[in-house]
Amino acid sequence: MNKHYRRIFLIVLDSLGIGAMPDAGAFGDGAVDTFGHICETAGPLDIPNLTRLGMFQLHPVAGVAAPEKPEGFLMKLAERSRAKDTMAGHWEMMGIETKKPFKTFTDTGFPKELIDELEKRCGKRVIGNKSASGTEILKELAPEEKNGCMIVYTSADSVLQICGNEKTFDLANLYRCCEIARELTMKDEWKVGRVIARPYLEVSPGVYQRTANRRDYAVKPPQATVLNALSDNGLDVIGVGKIHDIFSGEGLTRWIHSDSSVEGMQQTVELAKEDFHGLCFVNLVDFDAKWGHRRNPDGYAREIEAFDKGLGQLLDVLHPDDLLMITADHGNDPTAPGTDHTREYVPLICWSKTMDATGRMDGDSFGIIGATIADNFGVKMPEGCIGESVLNRL
């Protein structure tokens, strides 16, 4: 008979891949390895908690000693979806295989017809309309935005982003324009995964800083996910960080915004002290947004170390009937060329104070995660969902 856990904490270290998948070349990637290359260029990492759970057994690193027996059950997961983006990764965890990737406009910018309609309905002239770093485009175009313009840009992801100075392009108006953009980009030929409001302030002359009032407008999942199955059966489904945005709130019973990954872990520790029955699903985005896309291995390394400290706090407060699952949604190797995500395997580390045995196996989809969670709580996977439970190993 399988052991059943009262609460499951699923934490996504956004973009912490552990090596190139065999088809990485088809996605424009070479010998990418987010975790390995960070260890090589910015190590050694001070991560005692991830170490004892088994991170270095799952991904050996030259010169780093791993404990003889890890405390966690370890898996290396391959993404089945034909994608390497945040939404596809998270959706697959909850049972959805993405067979047709969302549109990207990295090389061309958005079509003139879309921009014309956006200008007409928003009442602002669009500037930018290209792929760019969010910090660099502010340096370039924020002074011009003061003249009643609207900065629109994209990236290597399937996104349309609109910047707005909170003092001159108020938040309500910025959100209104993003809602218009979301409506327009539901057309098949313009369909992006997310529209993102990127508010900022000029903190000193010529110096611009994003605020925590970002808002994502994501496409809803195309079908019911494991989250729906859980909430429909009366279980708690708590989203921390970007989870609400990624799933457009579908299947969640409660959600909490995080201003940083460190805060996200603090919020998770506090949630672990509460009494609930179900899933706490956490996304820690700073690995990806602050360090991966900006190709900063040192910053990424320090973020992993900060997470490890929070992980230690969480391990201390988890109950004997809690299960912890740590994973990632794709790679973003900060030593790779460009600024795009990278097509990589991801880790899955499972741990409980009462886990009977440790071990290791590989999996052919992220859907293993959702299937295991559904199995644990005795709920039926929605029709069409992928994934096979490994609960009997935990």
Image (spheres, helix red, strand yellow):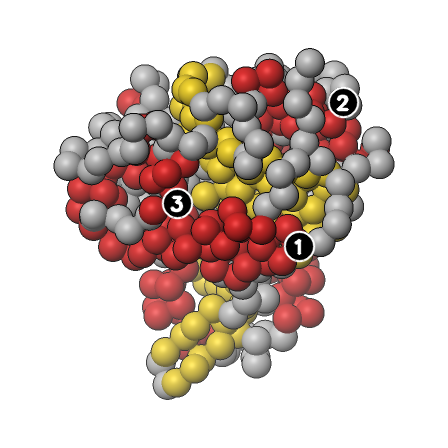
Quadrant, the C terminus: top right
Q: Quadrant of residue 331?
A: top left
Q: Which residue is mark 3?
A: 49
Farthest residue, direction bottom: 205
Residue 323 spot, x, y in % from top left:
59, 35
Quadrant, the N terminus: top right
Q: Which residue is mark 2?
A: 378
Residue at 52% over, 70% down: 211
Q: Quadrant of residue 185?
A: top right
Q: Earlier in the sequence, mark 1 or mark 2?
A: 1
The answer to whether 94 is drawn above or below residue 136 in the figure is above
Amino acid type of the residue tagged 2 in the rendering:
Gly
Residue at 72% over, 20% down: 381
Amino acid type of the residue tagged 1 in the rendering:
Lys
What crowding class fits label 2: few (fewer than 14 Cα within 10 Å), some (14-19), or many (20 or more)?
Answer: few
Please report contact status of discs 2 and 3: CB closer than 8 Å, yes or no: no
Q: Quadrant of residue 138?
A: bottom left
Query: In the displayed structure, does residue 42 sit left or right of residue 353?
Result: left
Q: Which mark, residue 273?
A: 1
Query: In the displayed structure, does residue 11 sit left or right of residue 345?
Result: right
Give the SS element for disc 1.
loop
Please report contact status of discs 3 and 1: CB closer than 8 Å, yes or no: no
Q: Earlier in the sequence, mark 2 or mark 3?
A: 3
Residue 241 spot, x, y in % from top left:
58, 53
Q: Earlier in the sequence, mark 3 or mark 1?
A: 3
Give the SS element for disc 3.
helix
Residue at 37% over, 85% down: 205
Farthest residue, direction left: 63
Query: In the displayed structure, does residue 74 sit left or right of residue 223?
Result: left
Query: In the displayed structure, does residue 97 sit left or right of residue 77?
Result: right
